[in-house]
Image: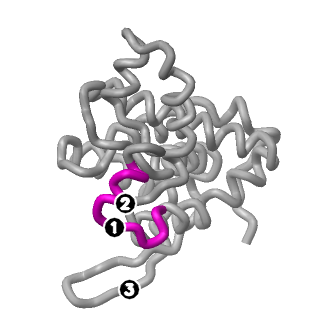
């Protein structure tokens, strides 16, 4: 997050600390001296957000799903898993459009890895969800397998709609699905209340 920086100041922070795919591609092909800087932006970009709503949205998902995944993995493995999810998510988005000059920012890819892990570990856990029916709002409990499957297909549905790294969401989620068993230290199935 840029803590209230807007205009040119905010854009400069995003450009410097966010990952710019075109700059990473250039460093990998001809500007090798820039590889260390671009590798560091993979990590710094995970801590930048495009505003309060972006930050709160990511932290809400992390809060709802992350604690149970962390319990299943342990603190150290969870941190490694989280950052690896973010790295894989970045690679997915980079491979989709390596010529993009738009800085990639946010923790969404890493959080998506947590969602994929949660789906494998706790598919039948009931997740309290706000359901919007025209002008009415109702809280319902939906099994994680239903909620996260809908979430995943929404990411696919929105592919190509600008301003969001949809491929990063998909990449992180698939990484979480595929590797959670390598990080999980025990068999789980029930969520602590």
The percent position of residue 193, horizontal first and vertical second, equals 73, 72
Q: Which residue is mark 2?
A: 9
Q: Is residue 160 above or below residue 94?
A: below
Report which residue position mark 3 lands on. 138
**Could you tell me residue 163's position as x and y percent?**
25, 51
Residue 91 lies in what quarter of the image? Answer: top left
Task: Report crowding for label 3: few under 14, some 14 to 19, many 20 or more residues within 10 A (C-alpha).
Answer: few
Q: Is residue 165 left or right of residue 193?
A: left
Residues shaded magenta: 1-14
Q: Badge 1 is on which residue? A: 6
Q: Residue at x 37, y 60 (%)?
A: 10
Q: Residue at position x 53%, y 68% from top?
A: 60
What is the CA distance from the residue labelled 1 to the residue labelled 3? 36 Å
- Whether tag 1 and tag 2 are in contact, CB under 8 A, the answer is yes
First of labels 1, 3 by sequence position: 1
> Would residue 10 be counted in the magenta stretch?
yes
CA separation in Å, label 3 and label 2: 41 Å
């Amino acid at each position: 997050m840029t803590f209230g920086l807007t205009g040119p100041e905010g854009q400069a922070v995003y450009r410097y600390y966010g990952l710019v795919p075109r700059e990473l591609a250039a460093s990998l092909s001809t500007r090798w001296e820039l590889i260390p800087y671009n590798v560091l932006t993979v990590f710094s970009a995970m801590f930048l957000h495009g505003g309060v709503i972006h930050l709160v949205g990511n932290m809400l998902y992390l809060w709802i799903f992350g604690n149970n995944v962390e319990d299943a993995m342990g603190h150290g493995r969870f941190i490694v898993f989280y950052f690896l999810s973010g790295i894989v998510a970045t690679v997915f988005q980079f491979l989709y459009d390596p010529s993009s000059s738009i800085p990639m920012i946010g923790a969404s890819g890493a959080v998506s890895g947590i969602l994929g892990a949660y789906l494998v570990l706790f598919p039948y856990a009931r997740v309290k969800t706000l359901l919007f029916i025209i002008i009415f709002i109702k809280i319902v409990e939906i099994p994680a397998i239903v909620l996260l499957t809908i979430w995943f297909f929404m990411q696919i549905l929105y592919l190509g709609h600008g301003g969001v790294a949809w491929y990063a969401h998909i990449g992180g989620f698939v990484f979480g699905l595929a590797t959670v068993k390598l990080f999980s230290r025990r068999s789980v199935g029930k969520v602590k209340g």
